[in-house]
Image (tube, rainbow, N blue to C red):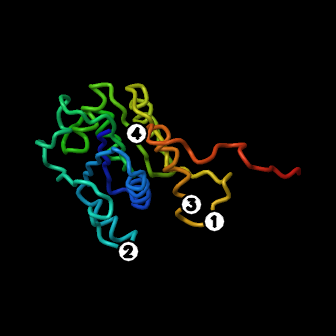
């Protein structure tokens, strides 16, 4: 499977980091291309206290202005795009068909070719504009997976909290099954 992971400048670089690590750990036949928005690498370095190193994840990075990247065309064989974390600016441009960089162009290709587009917005609270843009994308066939962690697994580390979102992203992307679902091995206390 060939996939594109787009990383925007929204806070939440750890979501992208955990996704790339989990895909790398699959050691399956997944080819990953990565595109950063203009300030995403700065956010990565600031939030994760580490510089980006593509060798850590076995991926190929494409410049956000490289419209010659293979996945900028509908004739490519890329099946999936995940935008994580997704800024509301990027989400708005995708929902309105504004293909002004490789991220938005690739999202446009995924939508027009009826391929899977998974968007992980990282914002709170949502404004009406945000909600309408998410509705528009959903109506076009995209899958919105908000960066809203769950707690029924009783996570104890930041990584485990983040993984509740990333495992869901991987599940809806058909990259693997979720580790656990609601009700599996969970005991609820009586009030």
Residue at mark 1: 156
**Left or right, residue 6 beside residue 150:** left
Marks 3 and 2: which is nearer the front? 3
Q: Which residue lies furthest to the left in this view?
A: 68
Callout 1–callout 3 Cβ contact below 8 Å? yes
Residue at mark 3: 160
Residue at mark 4: 118
Callout 4–callout 3 Cβ contact below 8 Å? no
Callout 1: SS? loop
Whole-angstrom CA distance, mark 4 to mark 3, is 21 Å
Callout 2–callout 4 Cβ contact below 8 Å? no
Residue at (63% x, 46% y) in the render: 180
Whole-angstrom CA distance, mark 2 to mark 1, is 21 Å
Marks 2 and 1: which is nearer the front? 1
Marks 4 and 3: which is nearer the front? 3
Whole-angstrom CA distance, mark 1 to mark 3, is 7 Å
Residue at (52% x, 63% y) in the render: 159
Q: Earlier in the sequence, mark 3 or mark 2?
A: 2
User: Are there few (<14), some (14-19), or many (20+) residues within 10 Å of tag 1?
Assistant: few
Residue 142 spot, x, y in % from top left:
40, 32
Q: Earlier in the sequence, mark 4 or mark 1?
A: 4
Q: Residue furthest bottom?
A: 49
Q: Which of marks 4 and 3 is nearer the N terminus?
A: 4
Residue at mark 2: 49
**Left or right, residue 181 beside residue 174:** right
């Amino acid at each position: 499977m060939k996939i594109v992971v787009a990383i925007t400048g929204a806070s939440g670089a750890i979501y992208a980091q955990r996704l790339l690590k989990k895909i790398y750990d699959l050691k399956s036949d997944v080819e990953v291309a990565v595109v950063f928005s203009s300030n995403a690498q700065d956010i990565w370095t600031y939030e994760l206290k580490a510089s980006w190193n593509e060798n850590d994840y076995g991926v190929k990075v494409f410049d956000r202005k490289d419209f010659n990247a293979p996945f900028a065309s509908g004739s490519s064989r890329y099946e999936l795009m995940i935008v994580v974390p997704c800024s509301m600016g990027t989400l708005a441009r995708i929902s309105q068909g504004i293909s002004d960089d490789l991220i938005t162009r690739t999202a446009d290709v995924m939508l027009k070719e009826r391929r899977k587009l998974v968007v992980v917005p990282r914002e709170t609270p949502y404004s009406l504009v945000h909600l309408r843009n998410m509705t528009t994308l959903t109506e076009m066939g995209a899958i919105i997976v908000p960066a809203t962690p769950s707690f029924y697994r009783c996570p104890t580390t930041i990584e485990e909290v983040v993984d509740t979102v990333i495992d869901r992203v991987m599940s809806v992307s058909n990259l693997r099954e979720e580790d656990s679902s609601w009700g599996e091995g969970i005991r609820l206390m009586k009030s």
